Amino acid sequence: MLEILGKTNIDFMGKRRWAFLFSGIMVMLGLVAVVQISRGSANLGIDFAGGTAVQLKFDQAIRIDEARKILEANGLGNAELQEFGQENKLLIRLKASTTIEEKVAERVVAVFTKEFPSNHFVVDSSTEIGPTIGKKLQEDALIAILISFVGIILYVAGRFEFRFGIAAALATFHDVLAVLGAFYLLDKEITLLVVTALLTLAGYSMTDTVVVFDRIRENLRMRRRDSEETIINNAVNQVLSRTIVTSLTVVLVLIPLTLAGGEVLHDFSLALLWGVIFGTYSSIFVASPLLLLWPGASGRLLKRS
Amino acid sequence: MKKVGGRLIVLALVVVLSVIFFIPSYQPFYQALPAWLKAVMPNKGITLGLDLQGGIHLVMEVDEDRAVEIAVDRSVVSLQDLLVDKKIPVESVTRTGPTQVTIQFQNAELKAQIQKMIEDYPTFIETESSGSANMLVWELRELEVKRIKDSAINQALETIRNRIDQFGVAEPMVQRQGLKQIVVQLPGVKEPKRAKDLIKETALLEFKLLDEDNQVKMDLPARIPKEKEAEVLKQAEAKLPVGDQILFERAVDKDTGREYRIPYLVKKRVMLTGDVLSDARVSIGQFNDPYVSITFDAKGGREFDRITGDNVKKRMAVVLDNTIYSAPVIQERITGGRAQITGTFSMQEASDLAIVLRAGALPAPLKIIQDLTVGPSLGKDSIDKGVQATLFAGALVVLFMMVYYRTSGVIADFALALNLLCLMGALSALNATLTLPGIAGIVLTIGMGVDSNVLIFERIREELRAGKAVRLAVDGGYEKALLTIVDSHVTTLITGVALFLFGTGPIKGFAVTLCLGIGINLFTALVGTKVIFDLMNQRHKVEQLSI
């Protein structure tokens, strides 16, 4: 049989201090991002912040600085521009400071028709979202996420022990925050699709954590003589090859999607890719050591079940 | 190891059902089927979301308060008319609040007489602030306010539906959302801007008489640039006779091509509105200029007959959404129940005007609060690229599993295919709408499907390492992985259900595919592949498992 890893015996738990330090930084970053989002100063997509986005596809290449100049000249100086090089596509975004009543999308189209008469274009997409809708979407997404977290903590607590539920939820939070923090740091736009990606990776990370926990529970029931640290370490080592193989297959799916999936899927796949990497790391280095921080019933509850 | 037969039958049944349900989603194949087969098969499959096939998604809000104001304004005008008819001199009848009408008069003796007139307006009640001897204050009843608001949204829905039907869009969706929002989805629309204008136009058609007696006194300019509208209105405000208003005609200078406005002094009283129309069509005039010819219904025709008969040689304005289209002189009594709306418009504008007139007016202006428009090219681009990348990614995974797990990997790949097939079948059976987030949900479930197999295989490997015989190792592997797989799926299912219940729009789409995918996953991982392993063990005793 072909194996990436043979039987391993790595002391993961011993490295937990370094892991906690690294994760602490990532979580702080994520929290900063969350605060900035709630203050409205992060790069929120217009689906959340409200505003207008117009994507144009030109026949010939268009220079982004020229486009910016003519938009400024026509009173649309606060537009953010992004181009998708090879295909002469230009994305123009205007945040909620301009309201939907002003027909911003039509104005943008009119400006380009007037200023680039020889370079014909089609409107690929245009989105206008009123600020109230964006607010509602934000709230709905938040409520859904909170409820699912409560549900998961309860389920895992019921199936394992309470501290397992907390640890699993914390590890998942950690992954979502880490990716959010990374997006914030790189000033990537947080759109509804990115939030969907965050939810997807939360699901993935949760699965990953539960698999490791399951093995820990199994081992806690069988070998009571070893210290808890050893038991957890062994469990992580036992499922390590599965963890690596699974993550590898998901990464195999995501790399082509990120590189060649088109502009719509790019940020989505990128968020997932980072999410998988963090998720794998967190189930080994975060979720499992967290159990040690809180001895709880030391597996006694598990033994009885 | 249990009997294989029963499970094989279930498996086959699921596959066949999935295929049958999926076929309508793949139109080229479905259309090629013989008619008798189509008749017994499901006829509707997966619909592609707007982000994938292009189109418009609009969320609009009816300005209900405005609808109430409009209704009150109408009562004010009709009360003014009634007072004139009964020769009761009053100083003013004005709307003094959203639902309030104030009548002021010099002669206190008239109070009782006017007070009695409320009988003609049963939707109003007199308020306590009518204490003064020279004033009466009426208020619209709360029940009526509620009724107007309620009917405003229903009427708007109805009107928009009519307009879209006449515009011609395949599978449009017009729906009420919450209390006062209307969602309109027009997949695959080629001219988004035109469609939006068509929906949004209030299209309130009114016929009003010009106040020619006071025209001179007002000293209105003959034509003004379009920016000056507000200025002219402000200047005229002080001199404006009771019951009159200023409206503008839109016109274009033939030489310069610039738009300008012609102000008119118009009587507020509405002679006739667009609800008495039975038809509106585009016709071509003698100079090849399009105009809209309208036909009144029986009642409207009689009214129009009477009005034109009473006002020969006077000018009547044709007003649409408070803009004058034309103000011709009534040459003679018009008996045929027909009229024309001329103005400066293109053929397309004329035909759109005919559509909105046929479909009726909106009760109040609409406010667009969300507008997503995806051009057909982007939709196609994202599908093509997404599909290509997904296929390539899928091929990588299939290959990896075969290399890493050999024969067992092939079995896992089979499970993967089964997974996709069932998911597509289930989505088709539910006539689900597939959006990009929905595809994300599929990617996640596929990932979980692979994971389930990896979990099982790694367990089987452990059992084999421990020296167990192949059959026992397979059974043991499945048994031990079972709990883990159930736990991991249930936790994800909790997320999925929460997102489905509390998420909106695209997030919901994600949740649907996720929840379906998890159920199907459990089935393929625990029944699908196990059957094959059992089948292998049953046929010939396997000494060495290729895993």
Image (tube, coloured by chain):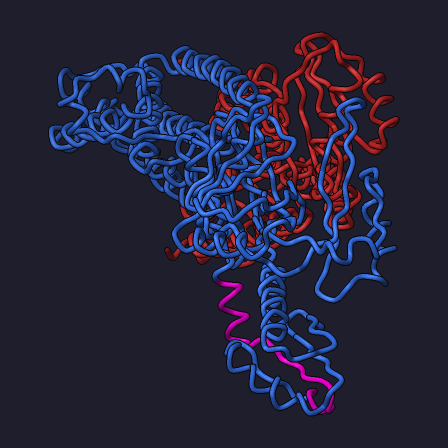
Chain colours: A red, B blue
- Residue A216 in view in this figure: no
Q: Position of residue B321 (x, y in %)?
A: 63, 48
Horizontal relation, residue A184 to residue B471: left or right: right
- Residue A275 in view in this figure: yes
> Residue at the spot x=60%, y=68% of the render?
B72
- Looking at the figure, which quarter contains the C terminus of chain B? top left
Nearer to us in this view, B56 or B77:
B77
> Residue at the spot x=58%, y=43% of the render?
B200
B345 up-or-down from B105: above or below: above
> Residue at the spot x=53%, y=76% of the render?
B121
Nearer to us in this view, B63 or B159:
B159
- Looking at the figure, which quarter contains the N terminus of chain B? top left
Horizontal relation, residue B497 to residue B121: left or right: left
Does the magenta portion include B149? Answer: yes
Nearer to us in this view, B100 or A75:
B100
Nearer to us in this view, A290 or B44:
B44
Does the magenta portion include A291? Answer: no
Question: What segment carries the magenta color?
Answer: B129-150
Q: Position of residue B475 (x, y in %)?
A: 25, 31
Quadrant position of residue B110:
bottom right
